[in-house]
Amino acid sequence: MHDETIALHGGYEPGSTRAVAVPIYQTVAHDFVDAAHAGAVFDLEQPGFHYNRINNPTNAVLEHRLAALEHGRAALSVASGAAAVSYSVLNVAAAGANLVTTPQLYGATYTYFAHVLPSFGIEARFAADDRAESIAELVDGRTCAVFCESVGNPAGNVVDLEAVAEVAHAGGVPLVVDNTVATPLMLKPVDHGADVVVHSLTKFVGGHGTTVAGAIVDAGRFGWAEHPERFPMFDRPEPAFHGVRFAADFPEAPYAVRARSICLRNTGATLAPFSAFLVLQGLETLAVRLERHEANARSVAEWLAADPRVAWVGYCGFPDHPSHELARRYLGGRAPSIVTFGPKGGYDAAIRFFDRVRLFKRLVNLGDAKSLVAHPASTTHRQLRPEDHARAGVTPDMIRLSVGLEHVDDLVADLDAALSR
Ligand SMILES: *Cc1c(COP(=O)(O)O)cnc(C)c1O
C-alpha cells in the first residue's frame, strides 16, 4: 500500500475488543502461559512479550509501521532520538573502533560523537565535508560504520546517499542514516543503500511538540557474517544473551534484534507506551501536515529572499542552494520546512531578531505544527568551538526557522515586524 495508508493502518490488527485506535498497553509485564512458553519467549524462539523495558504491544505497532514506511525489515522504538543515535553506534562498535561521520550534524549528536564516544575508546572521525570522497579517506580496517544525516540539521545539506553507501560498503561497513528532517515520506534511505535508519520521532513524525521519542530501522541487508573480525558481536556466541549468534540465528534483521536484546535490554532507554501512542497519532496525519509545512516554508523563504533586510536565505527548494540538485534527486523535488537565513548585521542582528519575534516560538525543537525559531550559534551548537561551527554548517548570524501550519500571512507579518523592530 501507499505511505499515507500505511501511516494510518500499518502494523495494527485489532484484537478481540476491535478497538480502532491502537490501545495503550500500560503494563510492565505479560503473563506467561507456562514455563515452556516463558523459556521460548525469553530465548526469542517464539514471538511474544515479556517485560516492558524490552518490548510492548503499543510500541510494536509503531515499530512495524515505521519499518514498513522506511522499507526496512524491523524497527526498535526507543526513548529519544539521542538514544537511537547512541544505540545505532554502540550496536556495532567496541573499544578500538572508529566511526566515520559527516560534520553537519544535530548539535547533541556532534557532541556525543566528538566528546562522549572517545571516552569509551571509540574514535569519531569527522570528514572535511559530506562528499563521498572525503568520507572514503577516513574509512579503514577499524571503522565500524559511516554515519550521516540525510538532510543535515541545521545546515540543510542533502547527502548523496548512494555515493556514500558505495564508499561504506567498499570499506566493509554499514551506512547509518539519521532521516529525522526528511521523514520516510520524503526520502527512504534504505532505497538508496542505507543499512540502518535512525529517527528522532520528536520532530515531524510526532509533529505536535508533545513527545520525545526515537527509533532505529534495520534494512536487514548488511552482511555482518562476511566481516567476522570487524563485527564479532554478530558472529560469536553472545555471552550477554545465552550464546545466540545474531547473524546466523536472526538472518531477517540481526541488527534490530541485537539492538533490542543487548543495547535496550541492558541500558533501558525504553519508550513509554503512552509516548508511542502519541507518536502514532502524529504519524497518521504526517502526509497532509508535510504538504502544508512545505507550502508555508516556500512562501516564507521567497518572502525572506526578496527582503532587503535579509543577507542570505538557505532553502534547498531554491535553485541556488548548494544541495538543490541532490534535493531534486533524493527528496523528489520536495524541500523540508526548515529555512535558515541571516539578517543583515551579523550575530547581533540575529539575536535582536530572535528576541523580537512574537508568533514564532523561541525554542530548539523542529517539525512542530507551530512555527519555531532557533539561533543555533547561541543554543544547540553553543558548546562547539568556533572552527567546529563552520564545519557543522552553523554561522554566527544563522537563524533557523521551522515553518509550521499557521496561516502564512500571519507568519510573514511576524517576521516583518521582528525585522523592523
Ligand atoms: C532532534 C534530533 C535528534 C535528537 O532527538 P531527540 O528526540 O531530541 O533525542 C537527533 N537527530 C536529529 C537530526 C534531530 O533533529
Image (tube, rainbow, N blue to C red):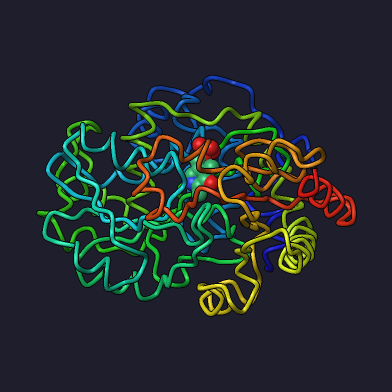
Q: Quadrant of residue 212?
A: top right
Decide: is 99 above or below 30.
below
Q: Is residue 398 left or right of residue 391?
A: right
| Residue at position x 68%, y 30% in the image | 24
Residue 391 in picture, x, y percent from top left = 37, 55
| Residue at position x 66%, y 28% in the image | 274
Q: Quadrant of residue 236?
A: top left
Residue 318 in picture, x, y percent from top left = 64, 74
Q: Is residue 45 visible?
A: no
User: Is 234 or 118 nearer to us in this picture?
Assistant: 118
Residue 68 in picture, x, y percent from top left = 57, 59
Q: Is residue 92 left or right of residue 18?
A: left
Q: Is residue 418 visible?
A: yes
Decide: is 395 above or below 291.
above
| Residue at position x 34%, y 36% in the image | 261
User: Is 413 or 404 nearer to us in this picture?
Assistant: 413
Q: Quadrant of residue 162?
A: bottom left
| Residue at position x 63%, y 32% in the image | 275
Residue 375 in picture, x, y percent from top left = 59, 42
Q: Is residue 311 left or right of residue 155?
A: right
Which quarter shows the C terminus?
top right
User: Is 211 or 239 nearer to us in this picture?
Assistant: 211
